[in-house]
Image (spheres, helix red, strand yellow):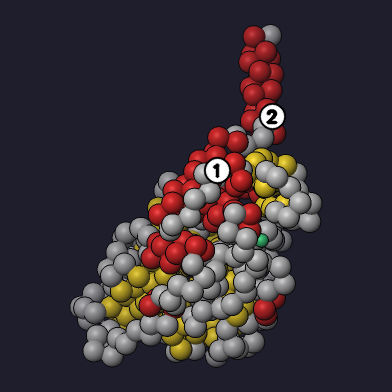
Amino acid sequence: MKRLIVCLISALLLSSCLWEEPANDELEMYVERFLSYADAHGYNFRDEDHAVKVSFDDLDENKAGVCYMDTHHPIIIKFDSAYWRKISGNTNSDCLKENLVFHELGHGLLRRLHDNTVLDNGDWKSIMCGDELPDDRSSNINYRGMRRDYYIDELFDRHTEAPKWSYYVPDFSDQPFQRIYHPDLMSETSPFVSGSTSSFTTACGAEGFSITNTSSSDGLYAFNFTDFDTSEDFLLEMTLSSTAKEYGIVVGQCNPKSGNYNGHYVYLDTDRHCFIGELSCSFPFIDLYNSDISTSVNKVGIRRHADTLFYYINDQYFYLNDLNGLPQGGGYVCLSMAKRSKTVIRDFVIRHDSPTRRAGTCTIEELPCPPLRKSPYDR
Ligand SMILES: [Zn+2]
């Protein structure tokens, strides 16, 4: 009986946590943060004329936030409780929450409308993007690391100069890397040792090495290397084709014993969208449209240089991103595959600035597949 009571109490506690509205105090904290930036940018919104009332609600039509700015005093801003819960507890929670609250206050206090201008590298010019977006892109904003300061400046001054990271094109020609891993993917013998899972099959053939996800759910297949150290500079290149609409590569760190893994990813789809993000974060950082993406075969490159990752499609550089603590050591490369799809690896090269370095042997294992889809929310 005692155990039953404990179970009932636990169940009640659990359900009350699940359904509890997020705390308004947290919203107030982000509003105060906005007001501090406003002070620093020469605005004064701390009087009664600029009163703002923020709260949570269940918003319709996948809205993450909404601002009633014209007919209300004080200005009323509501945030969707379900969205807030969804973005809580992840690595980039603070960035996403700040971004959303600042966007709504951008409408309410700065009187800004949506601005869907795109910077040279495909990033949005402003966190005020919204509504119908070009090329059917989602409104995810890479609002972190080196980008955050620019977006805050732009919010308060829309004439802020385009930041250097938006037009910088790296040149690594004076830093040639040497191949440290380049398996024969057409060999009769698999160059990889398969793990124990039964949800995928592999084969070598004239086109390359293929993996088929035979299960009814999406899969993440890790190539675990004994000696590929992701804390050092490297260049990873994979040439791929897939029967699925969407597929991707993850590079990072894995501890198979503890099941802990994280890493940065690039996803491509046949509509020429490219999603870039990190596994422990909610949603991709950015949804780019890239006309260099082929609908058949693509060569994807990810280069680590110091604390930055550089991304390439078919040998064309297109994006850079802060590592922000990319995992050290124990390197893996993953293929992300939709259910019942087949991906062919036509080439697989890892390069390093030390030719004596080796990536070591490689085993394939299946990892739990995290949700990587783009955010369906608007604001
Ligand atoms: Zn908006």
Q: Position of residue 104 (x, y in %)?
A: 62, 55
Q: Residue at x 38, y 85 (%)?
A: 169
Residue 223 visible in the current orientation: no
Q: Nearer the viewer, residue 71 or 286?
A: 71
Q: Residue at x 69, y 60 (%)?
A: 378
Residue 322 visible in the current orientation: yes
Please say if 352 is above or below 153: below
**Quadrant of res 356:** bottom left
Tell me the quadrant of the picture where the N terminus can be found.
top right
- Residue projecting furthest to the right: 60
Q: Earlier in the sequence, mark 1 or mark 2?
A: 2
Q: Nearer the viewer, residue 233 or 124?
A: 124
Quarter for ligand 1? bottom right
**Quadrant of res 193:** bottom left
**Quadrant of res 325:** bottom left
Q: Position of residue 138 (x, y in %)?
A: 65, 69
Give the residue at mark 1. Answer: 47
Please say if 214 is above or below 89: below
Q: Residue at x 65, y 68 (%)?
A: 114
Q: Which type of secondary structure does the marked residue at label 1 adopt?
A: loop
Q: Position of residue 48 (x, y in %)?
A: 59, 41
The kind of residue tagged 2 is Ser
User: Would you say 321 lies left or right of 74 here?
Assistant: left
Give the residue at mark 2. Answer: 15
